[in-house]
Amino acid sequence: MTEGTSVYWETFARRTLSRRRALTGAALATAGAAVAVACGPRSKGGGGQTARSSGAAGSDAAAAAIIGKEWNTSPGTPKYGGSISHAPTAPPLANLDPILSASAMVHQVASNAYSKLMRVSRKNDDLNTQVLYPDLATSWETASPTTWTFHLRPGVKFQNVPPTNGRPLTAEDIKYSILRSGTDKTSQLRGGFVNLDTIEIPDPQTLTLKLKRFDSLLFNNLAGHYAWVVPHELVEGPGLKNNMVGSGPFIFQNWEQDSQLTFKKNPDYYLKGIPFVDELKILQIGSQDDRIAALRSDRVLSQDQMFPSVYNSVKGDSHLQSQKYIVVSPRVLFMNYKEPLFQDDRVRKAISLAIDPNAIIKIENEGEGLWRGVISNQIAGWSLSQDELKSKDYFLRQDVTEAKQLMAAAGHADGFQSELLYNTSYPDFYKNNAQYLQQALAAINIKVNLVGQEQTAFRKNQDDHNYKGFIYGLDGEGFSEAYLLDYRSDGPKNGSGISMKSLDDQIDQVLTTPDETERKAKAKDLTRQILKQVLWKVEFDDDLQYVISQSWGKNWMAPSPQVYNTTGLAFTWIDKS
Amino acid sequence: MRAYLIRRMLLFVPVLVLVYTFVFVLIRIVPGDIVNLMMEGGSGRGTSAATAAELRHELGIDKSIQQQYAIQLQHLLRGDLGRSFRNGRPVTAEIGRRLPITLELAALAIVIALGSALVIGSLAALRHDTGIDRTISVLSIVALSVPAFWTGTLIVVLPARFWGYSPPFTFSSLIEDPTQNLQQMLPAALTLGAIFAGVLTRYVRSSLLEVLRQDYIRTAWAKGLRERIVLTHHGLRNAFIPVITVVGLQVSGLLGGAVITERVFNLPGMGTLTITAINQRDYPQLEANVLVLAFIVLVVNLFVDIAYGWLDPRIRVG
Amino acid sequence: MAITAAPLDKSLASREVGRPARIMRLRRMAQQKPLGAIAATLLMLVTVLALAAPHVTPSRYDHQDLTATLEGPTRGHMLGTDELGRDSFSRIVYGARVSLGVGLAAVVLGLAIGITTGLICGYAGGVTDLAAQRVMDAMLAMPLLLTAMVIVTVLGASVRSVIIALGVTVVPGVNRVVRGSVLGVKASLYVDAARALGAPSFRIVLRHVLPNILAPIIVAASVTMGFAIITEASLSFLGMGVPPPFPTWGGMLGSSGISGFAQQPWLAIFPGVAISAVVLAFNLLGDTLRDLLDPRLRS
């Protein structure tokens, strides 16, 4: 090529680039302010976050404009390039197929290679509030509580790797994926779609979901990890256990089992300029001590759910930045529904009164936490106030005298023998609290034997309700209303085996109320009822913990608690100046 | 010799069958299986018993233990070790990735241990009954008394706490990125090697002592040969013999110690693979792992026996 | 000592024999083997502390005091407190009970089984011996920690399962020693028996075997105690050891979230020191016993 022609090609490329950018800007303008500011379906519109201009010319301003509308933005000029290593906290990965596991890790990984209808993030300046952002759907509306319409983003392509080779992503693909999650025989996520009736595609840019009943959880789960859009070629071909090919911001490169997963930036991602970094590595580090060491030695971007003592030890380190937030503590005390002793509500109340939530908070999070009654405080507006939870009407508070009186009234002044089953695979979380519970119950003459079991056996016994007396087990961690689900007879984390038709009906009533304000009120009322009767479970607390991340990681924040994903990695940039 | 080899290798078979059966039965007795684990976590309405049954059927674990054993044994005879329950890949694939890592760790640990033991042990023997000798004797026992998980964790955590440094937690092979590889491997190999060095030093010292007392050594001394010549030409070679056997016998201990070390340093080797297989009830992976590890131990022991015979003319095997 | 020509004091002479003589002999052994003596003393001290734990410790091992969690070493708590406000020093002392008790029980179990099988295999020979030796080979072929892990997982974590798991791993080594001795004795006895035209009875074999194996067994027992303690600690570290609330040294070191090493170093140092010191003492003791009991090395 002569010099003259090379100059020609260069100028041509530059012109095409800027023209493409202009197009993108136009598309965004039409998408407009169709960003909902709160969880739950709304009618069209709602205020969006205004794009914060970085003030810089050219690509950086465009990038900032993008993320302002598509994701949180924090001050600063986005910079391009670099590699991020992230080590999520979750049990090890079995395989890469999102529908085969309800566990966190696979979805955290999947969120980089796949897309879904909407994204969820915490609010930048208020970590305990959530915001919904568009992803494959740029806007949505609910004509009726059981008809949800999503307007799809045009021009989205699958990644330019086999088997999709960059082909366009259509409404059919989205429908296919939702049905895969919702109906495949082996899907662990099936339960989330029980209220889905049909999916219609009135035109290529629109997807309509018809439901049997309104289901707030389903809407939230569509923004969560319940419907990753996967290409049918991959499902029919090599399968998803060892491959990830989607339409997400990062292209999957390699999975070294129990070591790391590597991704490269997707140059054809529909948001131009995203992701900022060239390479992403998701590390699998099993031990908490190792992860903290990795954080301190600048080997990973961030760690969430960090204890106050870790925060205190890194407070002065200018290389690290911290944000405080509420993390649900999903460990609860279940009482076996089949145990005759627990049929007497006085016994249950006495048990609850014997335990001090402040003790649990002290033990597991050095005293920084909030009381929790059924629904977590994680997302504002759903839980009862701290004052109300501590009131005399409920039994979360500790009152050993009253507890003993109740036991005596129930005819158990001398107490009884029982067992407390707990999980030995995560000693950080279970061991100490179990020992505290043992002592607390001993104070009212309930002598429990501690029985430890490792993860898999423990999980089996919790699911089968195969334990004597008590189990210190795992609650659901989900959207606010989801905590009520664990009280349903078919609830996924119904560790006590409770089965009351009236309760099931009441829970359904809450979950099928379309109006969010009304739903919140009903949820609170139901919470009050549950707490007043101590329905076979005692929830304790939420912890005030920290997200600690490297100072060079800009625009990063902890993933939303309601969803398992690390979507934010695509919108994080590295600035080491 | 050939007959001896064949006879020994034939004896591998019943041993491996016993090991396989032991693990096969025990892990299926433990409550819970991988399907229970797959249902872990998540929000909203969970999965149903039907899904669980479907998954179990796919994996073939809904049959009785005897039935499963018969089926798996047939596969085994065809050389098919099966596929992992986790990701459906052949178990040998994962072993192929992880075994070199454990072997590298073990090899580095042996090199570190042997190197230091030969030097320090010889020093102790040559300076028998002096302060140096006594110090070395005590230190070597200290080295093998300190638990690996303790020293290992301290090595990871303390430098991070005080100097902001930790070894890398992701693995790169020696060929790809030797710096990263060694940064991760060396602390781990040191932890493991230190213990092993303690064991070996004692053997080097005591066997060298025994050799040094022999008549022909005394003759060499009397003739006025320099210490170094006496040591290398006469002493070390014969002292080396018991040390070889100790290395061989320690292989299974080394592989076991690797389990803890790999966990602490986040090395994706056979140790962590086996622990994960136990915890996640990945039956085929666990069985294959145990077979491979047992086979290695048996082979090494056989090799040691042969080497022993080769090194010491007084003992001839076969 | 100088040879004096002073007249012998008869009263002195009578006092030198008997109890003082034994003490003199012990003292001489201690002088010859100072390390062994130190080790033995340390172990006796630890044993006494462990047995007398309730009287020696400022508080019970499970006494929770949530107003004083995670404190460093202070006057009231020599070695600090843990997440539940329990006194670390007390827990370490009680922990000695587990380490020593479990170790001892495991070694005794292993010895019992190992000696029995060794005797039977050596004496019976034939198919029994062949089969049993393959089983022993199988046990040795698997890394011992893994075997222990599998056994504990199957039986569920408890004191009993840890003892069984550890005891089982001890068996092959003991079996080998005993069997070897039986075979040796049998060979020599057969010569005599051939003359008397009868196979040596089991009782005769036993009588000849026992004194031969006594020395190696004692040495092995001491060293195996060290191994058992470390393996128990490793199991506890992995979360598979003796379950709470009883304290174990390994469990105190295991990853415990807040009390991860990074945050509260004192909780991480002292149990580790305890394990190392006790194991060291057992190994030193084993060495000393071997020197004393094994005539071959007494040069």
Image (cartoon, coloured by chain):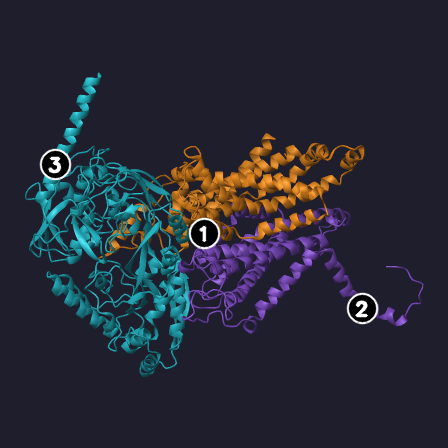
Chain colours: A cyan, B orange, C purple
* Comparing labels 2 and 1, the label whose residue is closer to the camera: 1
Q: Chain of mark 3?
A: A
Q: Amino acid at mark 2?
A: Gly
The residue carrying pointer 2 sits among few (fewer than 14), some (14 to 19) or many (20 or more) residues within 10 Å by Cα, namely: few
In the rendering, at what x and y percent does residue A403 appear?
33, 79
> Rounded to the nearest whole Å, what is the CA distance between mark 2 and mark 1?
60 Å
Separation of marks 3 and 1 at Cα, in angstroms: 51 Å
The residue pinned by badge 3 equals A22
Q: Work out whether disc 2 and disc 1 sit on a shared chain.
A: no
B197 or A173: nearer the viewer = B197
Element under disc 1? helix
For the residue carrying disc 1, how many other residues have a C-alpha within 10 Å: few (<14), some (14-19), or many (20+)? few
Q: Is residue A81 above or below residue C210?
A: above
Position of residue B91 in the picture relative to residue C288 (left or right): left
Q: Can residue A199 be seen?
A: yes
**Nearer to us in this view, C121 or A557:** A557
Say which residue label 1 marks. Answer: B162
Q: Secondary structure at mark 2?
A: loop
Evaluate if marks 3 and 1 touch, with contact meaning CB atoms under 8 Å apart: no
Q: Where on the picture, by quarter, is residue A268?
A: top left
Residue at position x 83%, y 67% from top?
C17
Q: Mark 1 belongs to which subunit? A: B
Q: Residue furthest toward the top?
A: A2
